[in-house]
Image (cartoon, rainbow, N blue to C red):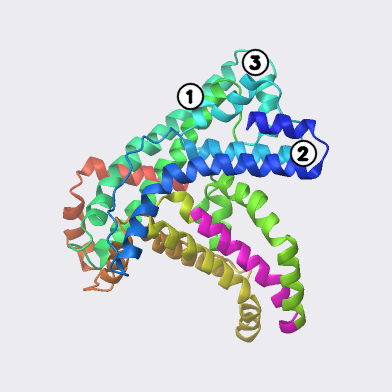
Amino acid sequence: SYLATRLMQKSTDKKTRKKYLIWCLVCNFGILVFLKYCNFAITNFSLFMSLFHVNIPDNHISIVMPLGISFYTFQSAGYIIDVYRDKYECCNNIFKFALFVSFFPQIMQGPIGRYDRLSPQFNEPHYFSLENTEYGLQLMLWGFFKKIVIADRIGVVADKVFLHPYDYNGIFVIVGVLAYCLQLYADFSGGMDVVSGAAELYGIKLDKNFRQPFFSKSISEFWRRWHITLGTWMKDYVFYPFSLSKKMMKFSKFMKKHLGTFAGKTLPICLADLLIFFLVGVWHGAAWKFIVYGMYNGIIIAASSLLEPVYEKMFKVTHINKNAKWYRVFQIIRTFILVNIGWVFDDAANLKESFVLIKNVFVNFSIKPLFDGSVRAMMEFSSMDMLAIAVGIAALFI
């Protein structure tokens, strides 16, 4: 990445610069794809060939995964593309560039930083600040509270349901999914707090990665509030280049001519959304359940865009005030339910068990176990555990 951008900076020929860009992106993502998806590809190729009665051994390669490879690959790729676009000049000091790529707090979980926001902070002088230290330690303490007191405790309940999908049904599955939702948010956002607090000790302010996602009124809004830096990375380096490409512009004109202005404007955006969420699914891991998870979100967002005229007609016919408080609450609850259905694909062991869990929600469904002690017995929580979770949820909500 360092060499390619240096060579790119020296060249004035667009074709040569583009060659350096493509070469570097192929190298970066090629390494990532091989390490993360090689065994996934071997398994699926073996299964595919078995359909033709060709026996190919499913021999996995033993790979030691480099720490934080997804995050520093995306961070480096953003930097390479920005230099190619002449957004800023490349970094000539390899040690300063290495600091940007591998700044230690964010290497494991992000946030995915941008060079133009981090580099000035790294290069300016820093002095001890009691205020930064206090704020950084408080933020880290809050993050550890979320991770250790809330996420690790409630995760026991999520594991019970997701590790034994055939043993639970009805309200027990819903409790398990809600437990995973709380575990994931507390763990991931808590991790971001620890990371941001650690950086704050050194006077470095990282980008926000969460902004009250469970108050979102739609799935698209949820993804603008959840893992924000991944979403903005996808928007800047995939969504806009794809939706504004020459082929998409031709496709847009064709759709406008044959299906009208709305279709011409909306369909390219829908295709871009589907591409992004396919990549988001692949980003989460090498398994079909993650691809389905990504496409689940992409299809909902694309369908919402396509059905916008239908919604508008519905509001006129029913005289529903879109800005009414009750309707906003309805949107938040609806979005929360849709998000939690998606989490089933994220945490289940495989795609088959995801559908088993969803199906089991409707088997012997009753809210009686919530009141007769059955759910409490399944949780195996002490009174102090219940109090810690209740206080934790209240603190998160506030």
Number of labels in the image equals: 3
Label pair 3/2, CB-CB below 8 angstroms: no
Mark 1: amino acid: Leu
Span colored in magenta: 258-280
The question of residue 224 being in magenta is answered with no
Residue 348 placed where, x, y %? 31, 57
Q: Secondary structure at mark 3?
A: loop
Quadrant the N terminus occupies: top right
| First reached walking from the N terminus: tag 3 or tag 2 | 2
Label pair 1/2, CB-CB below 8 angstroms: no
The label nearer to you, 1 versus 3, is 3
Mark 3: amino acid: His
Label pair 1/3, CB-CB below 8 angstroms: no
Alpha carbons under labels 1 and 2: distance apart: 35 Å
Find disc 2 in the rendering and name its residue: 87
Residue 362 placed where, x, y %? 28, 73
| First reached walking from the N terminus: tag 1 or tag 3 | 3
Residue 62 placed where, x, y %? 32, 39
Find disc 1 in the rendering and name its residue: 137
Mark drawn on residue 32: none
Find disc 3 in the rendering and name its residue: 126
| First reached walking from the N terminus: tag 1 or tag 2 | 2
- In this view, the residue farthest toward the right is 12
Crowding at mark 2 (Cα within 10 Å: few <14, some 14-19, many 20+) = few
Q: Secondary structure at mark 2?
A: loop
- In this view, the residue farthest toward the front is 54
Q: In percent of the image, x 68 and y 71: which residue is there?
A: 266
The label nearer to you, 1 versus 2, is 2
Alpha carbons under labels 1 and 3: distance apart: 18 Å
